[in-house]
Image (cartoon, helix red, strand yellow):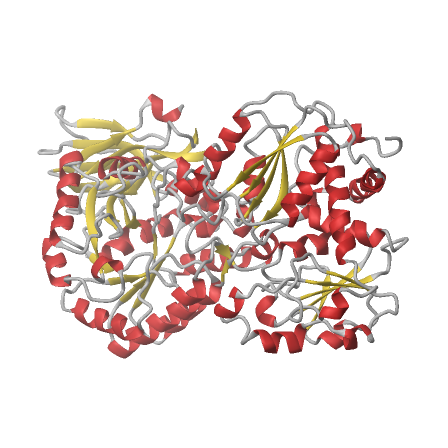
Amino acid sequence: MGEGNPSFWPHKDLIDITTLDRDEIALVLETAGRFSEINERPVKKVPILKGKSVVLFFAEPSTRTKTSFDVAGKRLSADTFSLATSGSSLTKGESLKDTALTLESMRPDAIVIRHSRSGAAQFLASRLDCSVINAGDGRHAHPTQALLDAFALSRVWESFEDKNVLIVGDIAHSRVARSDVVLLTKLGARVRLCGPRTLLPSSLESWPVEVHSRLDKACQGVDAIICLRLQLERQAAGLFPDVREYARTYGLGPRHLAEADPGVRVLHPGPMNRGVEIDNELADSGQSLILDQVYAGVCVRMAVLFLLLTRPNQGDGHGRR
Amino acid sequence: MAGVEMLVRSVLWGGRPHDLVVSGGKIVELSPNPVATGSEVELVDGSGLLLLPSMIDAHVHLREPGQEYKEDIASGLGAAAAGGIGRVLAMANTMPVNDQASVTRFMLSQAARSHPNGPFLHPVGALTKGLAGKELAPLMELAEAGCLAFSNDGRPVGDNALFLRALEYASDTGLPVIDHCEDPDLARGGAMNEGRISSLLGLTGIPVTAEALQVARDILLAEYLDLHVHLAHVSCRQAVELIAWAKGRGVRVTAETCPHYLLWDETLVGDYNTRAKVNPPLRTWDDVLAVRQALAEGILDILVTDHAPHADHEKEQTFDDAPFGISGLDTALSLVLGLVKNGFLDMETVMDRFAWRPADIFGLPANRFRPGDPADFFLFDPDLDWKVDERTMRSKGKNTPCLGTELQGRVTRHFLAGKEIFRLQAEDMK
């Protein structure tokens, strides 16, 4: 790697976007761009992380994120190990701390964690010497998702400055939205949020965003729209009346795109509820970047693993803090 | 002076040196002039020390029976003695719940066995069976067994009709009802104050409205029934304003707050700091200022610790999974002293809120240093620095945000009915 020398990468962990400055974000995206070429080769593997061990600790169901990290690690020749919750000691009542210490005793170089509790990744990071990568903690943060969203957009945009990005749906419970807002604003984009009041955080005044309640107005002039997945259990919690009404009010369809910039791009972190938060045909249209996001995910996660696992002094001083 | 047992020489009272004379477990005289006594008298040098009345903590959790690994009655009362607290009201959320006389008697016997000279334990009986909020507990039986008040503790009764009946029925015992003011539906699932920080951390918030709504309910019921309700650990401006309004109307409400609501705000939760997880949650700085002012003005009547000890491994979890609670007996007075030194409160107000007013509300003896008052007092060195850590805290629960920090001010000796129940040792200062 030439410019963006990873020897300057200062972070042991990747917990959220707030800890990254704009140059560091640029370095991740640029590194991801360089690694994307590997994914196009007939033999999609380089020995750059040979001998490194990465534990995939997914204490919450996930298919695409886990697979994406797994593919990313293997393409860089890291050994990846999965720990599923079903059948794991966590389901037998073991504390997160003890699980983490047990895992670290096996001397991994990084643990990728997905957990239902906000702060779980930071909890591990403050106690373990190996790198901790947050693959989604509760409703707090999902930094690699935000980075891959930015990477997918960076492949079609020259710059984020003065771009308008709309995030629509269940913002309150979304770690993707929180990380996207931080990342996109750091890159110079303007962010709008749209969703029913019951699915918006209670204290939005401190967020650097515009808030809309009507989707057609929110779409006016936007350059990208990120649809969030609707969790159907929110209906049972009384946060919206029913899926049909939600889809009519906040489901993204072709008529909304007429309000947006002609080059508007549509994103979705997946898995999608087609016909609920996004129109079926729109998801498959030329304006959709949804499959590009999946591709971007592998590139970005390769970059993150590379930057964390090749930083100076990496691998020193295993043991409890 | 004949019959005198103890003379505390040159101790500071009201900013001036006084001599305190004790006999038969009672105050004989507090004199600004040197007092002459016979040779049999125990002389205590009070030079440079403050003389303060032994305090009453009307809200503690001693965890026995059932969770002795967090705290037991012996260790909890030991921490109280070291903190200048001579009487504690122990909450009912033990295992089993204190909803029957056998549990009350067990608690009293454990206290008498471990601390025969005090600190004294006064059980608070459960308001409803099992704290389940469905049926009234046997309040008469609990009162006869020695309970001093009733409360559903951290599981407030959401059923307004049941709570009204509980107030009516409890009034026949003459004992007050203490209510943890939190609307259970609005607070459900919450882990910290609802606001900017909860939204950034992705934690479910507990809105101030959850507290204020229940405070308003209790005020309206107290007025409707013309009965006394005591409001537990008030934490926010909205609640304070409602209580001020109620008192202005002559409604029979009293209220308490804790040192942590006077000192710390929600920013302490910071990076998911579980030692700052408490219920009600630490609020905004505006709420802190409102609570301080309300305590100084007497809108909030008393100070309590809401001492809620937990084991380290319980707090060492993700924020959502960690239990609520701050261990407070050891540190309460040192924390409040900081506010005295900064001029937010004066020492007499602190003693009124931590000794005299709780005695009035809960019908306990108080020492106002008048002749004949019980000789319940302690000596306090306001300049003594100490580090809050595992060794200097007497409570088994080390779960306080000030763990590892230096505090100023320490109880050096503590007497109840003239008998010494605590003396600061060298190991307490490590």
Q: Is B323 situated above or below A213?
A: above
Would residue B52 be found to the left or right of residue A108 on screen? left
Left or right placement of residue B113 versus residue A10 in this view: left
Give the number of marks: 0
Q: Position of residue B214 (x, y in %)?
A: 38, 68
Q: Quadrant of the N terminus of chain A?
A: top right
- From the viewer's side, name the closer residue of B412 and B26: B412
Q: Is residue A200 above or below residue B126?
A: below
Closer-to-camera residue (B14/A305): A305
* View extreme (right): residue: A158
Q: In this rendering, does residue B368 appear at all?
A: no
Residue ID at (21%, 43%): B65
- In the image: residue B260, left or right of residue A72: left
| Residue drawn 25% across the image and 63% down it | B177
What residue is shown at x 32% (from left), y 50% (from top)?
B354
Please state the horizontal and vertical placement of residue B251, each as a whole percent of the image.
Answer: 31, 73
Q: Residue at x 35, y 26 (%)?
A: B428
Q: Nearer the viewer, residue B426 or A210?
A: A210
* Residue B411 location (% of width, % of height): 33, 34
- Mark yes or no: residue B332 visible: yes
Q: Residue furthest front?
A: A42
Q: Quadrant of the C terminus of chain A?
A: top right
Quarter of the view holding residue A304:
top right
Specify the quadrant of the image occupied by residue B186. bottom left
| Residue A35 coordinates in the image, percent (x, y) | 82, 38
